[in-house]
Image (spheres, rainbow, N blue to C red):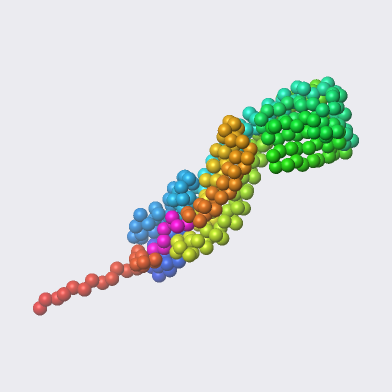
Amino acid sequence: MGKRPASHRKLRRPRQAELYRAGWLLSAATPPRRLAILARNGLEMETVEKTNRFAWQPITPKGVATFARAPLSHLLTVQMLCALVFVAAELSFLDRAWFPVVTDAIRHLQPEGRIQSGVLDWGGIAASTLAENRFLSLAVDLPHEGTVRSPAHFQVEFGRTGLKIFSVFGFVEAAYPARWTFAFNRPELEPAWGAWRPAFLAMAGLVTLAVLMAGWAIVALIYLGPVWVIGFLADRDLDLSACRRLAGAALMPGALLLSLGLVLYTLGILDLLQLGVVWALHLLAGWVYVCIAPFMVERPASAGAKASNPFAPAPATRTDSTA
């Protein structure tokens, strides 16, 4: 009979005991083959499965806490799903609220018009509203006299040398680029917008998806410190990688809340100020889960009675001898 492969040989007991005390053998990143070896060497399967929990819902504090013991792939999968939910809400808003106004405004442009050398050449009247709804208004006001103000949540006003964007938060002004030339007429913009509208939606979704995933990774690093401090003070079994996964999962409830708020805003149930309140609450939700979820993580095995070492030899039993 040939020798057993090295991956199937039993580890020496002193080395096993040392790694077990250090917690390395039972980390969330333990390979399945190593877990199988540990199980064959006497480790209880309940303890083995404890380190490979399936984390799937980041809604409750307990659900967020399970990501501390789950592989990083579980967190990334859930984050991707939450990002797709927000992207779907965003694209629905653009398609139903803003893009129809742009389409209607292009249809009301003059046959000739151009922005050239930083100046708008407009063949129509000096001040007119092109299209509007409760979300967006597009207008032309060459002298910026304020004669075409709209109650829409956002208004884009094209002037002679620049544009202004108004909202309940104030306004910003930007000059037209002097070196660029833009078409500002119906014959050129109508077919171009019809062809590029789906592409603009796709690009908006991809950019949002990338920004969300990158932003959550950066914010999770910021939240890592508070999670570790809370876990340390509460005597919870959290290393830095577990803190990072928990912090990343703590951002998901706020993201789902903001997605719901954007859907309600698109349906007209919320106004812009109420959407701003939802945005503030979604930031607060992250900190709430960061402060609560670490308490849902189990304590170390040595908190009360020390856990038994499965690799240590069993103590010898004493038997009474009879004469």
Comparing 4 with 237, the one in front is 237
Query: Is 78 colored magenta in this rendering?
Result: no
Q: Quadrant of residue 171?
A: top right
> Which quadrant is home to the N terminus?
bottom left
Q: Main secondary structure of the magenta part?
A: loop
Comparing 73 with 287, the one in front is 287
Q: Which residues are magenta?
A: 294-301
Q: Can residue 11 be seen?
A: no
Residue 232 coordinates in the image, percent (x, y): 49, 64
Comparing 2 with 281, the one in front is 281
Q: Residue furthest left?
A: 323
Q: Residue furthest right?
A: 117
Q: Which residue is drawn at the image coordinates 44% and 51% (left, top)?
A: 62
Q: Is residue 26 above or below residue 87?
A: below
Q: Which residue is drawn at the image coordinates 70% and 32% (left, top)?
A: 151
Residue 28 coordinates in the image, percent (x, y): 47, 55
Left or right, 3 with respect to 274, comes to left
> Which quadrant is home to the C terminus?
bottom left
Left or right, 202 with respect to 38, comes to right
Q: Which residue is drawn at the image coordinates 46% and 47% (left, top)?
A: 60
Residue 85 coordinates in the image, percent (x, y): 56, 38
Residue 287 coordinates in the image, percent (x, y): 54, 53
Q: Is residue 195 above or below residue 322?
A: above
Q: Which residue is drawn at the image coordinates 56% and 58% (left, top)?
A: 224
